[in-house]
Amino acid sequence: MFKHQVEAQLKSFLAAIVATATLVASTPAPADSWYCAASGTTGASGWGRSPNLGYAQLIALRECAVRTPRNATCYIMYCS
């Protein structure tokens, strides 16, 4: 009976390790983030960082727009 309990605990422990390793592997690292820079026609600038390229661009454009007067435009300069 004791042997079955030890085996069950070992299986549970191994399953927990596998689950933790899977979660850690699927979490994006900071190196996996996109960095985008935006610049406005009046010299304003902004940047954004996100694992999602579209969000990084949106953040950069919003940061630039906050510093830009009306009727001026911000453009994405680059993303890496």
Image (tube, rainbow, N blue to C red):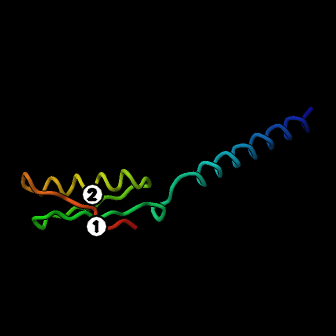
**Residue most toward the top?**
1
Q: Secondary structure at mark 1?
A: strand
Check the picture and name the quadrant holding the C terminus. bottom left
Within the image, what quadrant is residue 61 found in?
Answer: bottom left
Q: Is residue 64 above or below residue 13?
A: below
Front in this rendered view, residue 49 or 75: 75
Front in this rendered view, residue 3 or 32: 32
Q: Secondary structure at mark 2?
A: helix
Crowdedness of circle 1 by 10 Å Cα count: few (<14), some, many (20+)?
Answer: some
The residue wearing badge 1 is 77
Check the picture and name the quadrant holding the N terminus. top right
Q: Is residue 79 left or right of residue 70?
A: right
Q: Residue at x 35, y 55 (%)?
A: 56
Distance from label 2 to label 1 (Cα)? 10 Å
Front in this rendered view, residue 76 or 11: 76
**Residue type, numbered disc 1:** Met
Q: Nearer the viewer, mark 2 or mark 1?
A: 1
Label drawn at residue 43? none
Percent x, y for residue 79?
Answer: 36, 65
Percent x, y for residue 59?
Answer: 29, 53
Q: Residue at x 71, y 48 (%)?
A: 18
Residue contact at pointers 2 and 1, CB within 8 angstroms: no
**Residue type, numbered disc 2:** Ala
The residue wearing badge 2 is 60
Going from N to C along the chain, the mark reached first, 2 or 1, is: 2
